[in-house]
Image (cartoon, grey):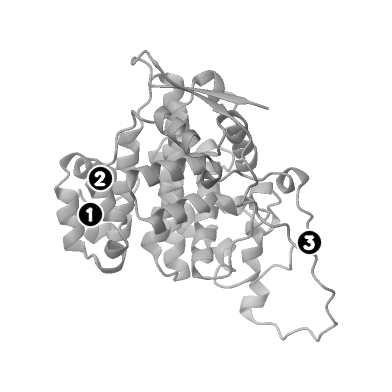
């Protein structure tokens, strides 16, 4: 079936930007392999209980939801060159991010940058610096006294938090609404991104994960494609795309737009020239929907980011009214089906307990109040 996405510029520009015709892609190279049935195991003596084992839930034997098993998200690499060019035409009016974003996301910066270098970079972008300071001084963080400079902000909140705030504000400045209805949708996506970033920052610290800065940045950038589609998709089409439920939303995006939002984000990040490792982490995060995360450091980082993104969306939409009531082990939603495998292994076995901790619940409640959710 041919699918048509008529991409338009923001209202007021008054011109249709492009008409994109989708043709079925050739064989999907990135379709996740179906899991093979495990071979029967010989009976073995149960291991002695340890705190880690006591905290870990039993292996999940829930069958995969049929709708999830049948869904295979398309990948940007499946598109011919003319299709990629068509998408870029739709988003040609989206301004490129400032050089500051490239510096903040460079692998060298993650590895070696210090507070002084971060302060210098942000201070060279007065508009971004002002927005960061406004956020830092809001009720989100509840600081006892006002922060008057970026250096103070880094001292109080830490390098990774301030860097994340910079990236969030750059993305927010990139996609502006053209009316009340689109503004509501964009603000919900922005709130989800902010909440997800805060969750990732705090949980990665508590879990002692490596590359925390890269992990938090991947969470923020994973919302890029969603912001882009909300900002540029004609409202009649946008209204047919569910706001809740990653599986339902990705299926609708692929049906209506030809690609899920995460792959549109991959396209934009590639066009902007962001580092390949940054692009891969951010764009691959949503693909945990259809394949279990790898059991290595990167897989663990992406698994935590994926959870934070999903919880940020639920909190921003009102689907999840309170983190304290969350029971991850009992969550049977399709969007967490493959993710749940991480609960049986270190280092994420404690994440269910940490998500409901008093300090995190209080911080997220304060943030939601500041965001007027």
**Dots 3 and 1: beta carbons under 8 Å?**
no
Residue 209 image point, x, y percent = 45, 69
Circle 2 residue:
132
The crowd level at tag 3 (other Cα within 10 Å; few <14, some 14-19, many 20+) is few
Of the numbered discs 3 and 1, the one sitting upstream in the chain is 3
The crowd level at tag 1 (other Cα within 10 Å; few <14, some 14-19, many 20+) is many
Q: Quadrant of residue 86?
A: top left
The alpha-carbon separation of the residues under discs 3 and 1 comes to 47 Å
Instruction: Give the numbered dot on residue 64.
Output: none
Q: Nearer the viewer, residue 26 or 232?
A: 26
Front tag of 3 and 1: 3
The alpha-carbon separation of the residues under discs 3 and 2 comes to 45 Å
Q: Nearer the viewer, residue 350 or 309?
A: 309
Q: Quadrant of residue 314?
A: top right
Of the numbered discs 1 and 2, the one sitting upstream in the chain is 2
Circle 1 residue:
153
Q: Image check: 117 left or right of 164?
A: left
Residue 159 image point, x, y percent = 28, 60
- The answer to whether 119 is drawn above or below residue 20 in the figure is below
Quarter occupied by the N terminus? top right
Q: Image check: 150 left or right of 34?
A: left
The alpha-carbon separation of the residues under discs 1 and 2 comes to 9 Å
**Dots 1 and 2: beta carbons under 8 Å?**
yes
* Local SS, label 3: loop
- For the point 36% across and 61% down, the residue is 213
- The answer to whether 145 is drawn above or below residue 174 in the figure is below
Q: Quadrant of residue 296?
A: bottom right
The crowd level at tag 2 (other Cα within 10 Å; few <14, some 14-19, many 20+) is many
Of the numbered discs 3 and 2, the one sitting upstream in the chain is 3
Instruction: Give the numbered dot on residue 61.
Output: 3
* Local SS, label 1: helix
């Amino acid at each position: 079936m041919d699918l048509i996405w008529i991409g338009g510029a923001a209202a007021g520009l008054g011109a249709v930007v492009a008409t994109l015709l989708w043709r079925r892609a050739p064989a999907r190279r990135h379709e996740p392999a179906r899991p093979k049935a495990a071979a029967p195991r010989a009976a073995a003596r149960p291991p002695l209980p340890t705190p880690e084992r006591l905290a870990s839930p039993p292996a999940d034997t829930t069958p995969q939801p049929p709708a999830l098993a049948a869904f295979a998200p398309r990948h940007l690499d499946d598109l011919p060159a003319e299709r990629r060019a068509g998408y870029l035409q739709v988003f040609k009016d989206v301004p490129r991010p400032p050089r500051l974003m490239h510096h903040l996301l460079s692998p060298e910066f993650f590895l070696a940058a210090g507070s002084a270098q971060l302060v210098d970079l942000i201070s060279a972008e007065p508009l971004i610096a002002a927005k960061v300071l406004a956020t830092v001084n809001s009720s989100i963080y509840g600081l006892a006294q006002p922060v008057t400079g970026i250096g103070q902000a880094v001292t109080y909140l830490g390098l990774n938090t301030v860097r994340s705030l910079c990236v969030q504000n750059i993305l927010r400045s990139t996609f502006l609404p053209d009316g009340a209805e689109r503004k509501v949708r964009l603000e919900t996506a922005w709130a989800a991104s902010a909440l997800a970033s805060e969750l990732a920052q705090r949980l990665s610290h508590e879990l002692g994960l490596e590359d925390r800065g890269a992990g938090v940045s991947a969470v923020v950038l994973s919302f890029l494609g969603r912001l882009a589609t909300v900002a540029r998709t004609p409202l009649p089409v946008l209204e047919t795309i569910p706001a809740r439920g990653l599986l339902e939303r990705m299926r609708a995006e692929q049906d209506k737009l030809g690609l899920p939002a995460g792959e549109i984000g991959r396209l934009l990040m590639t066009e902007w020239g962001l580092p390949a490792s940054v692009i891969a982490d951010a764009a691959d995060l949503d693909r945990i929907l259809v394949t279990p995360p790898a059991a290595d450091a990167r897989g663990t980082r992406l698994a935590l980011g994926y959870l934070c993104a999903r919880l940020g969306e639920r909190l921003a939409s009102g689907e999840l009214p309170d983190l304290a009531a969350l029971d991850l082990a009992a969550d049977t939603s399709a969007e967490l089906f493959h993710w749940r495998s991480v609960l049986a292994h270190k280092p994420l076995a404690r994440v269910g307990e940490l998500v409901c901790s008093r300090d995190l619940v209080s911080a997220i409640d304060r943030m939601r109040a500041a965001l007027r959710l």
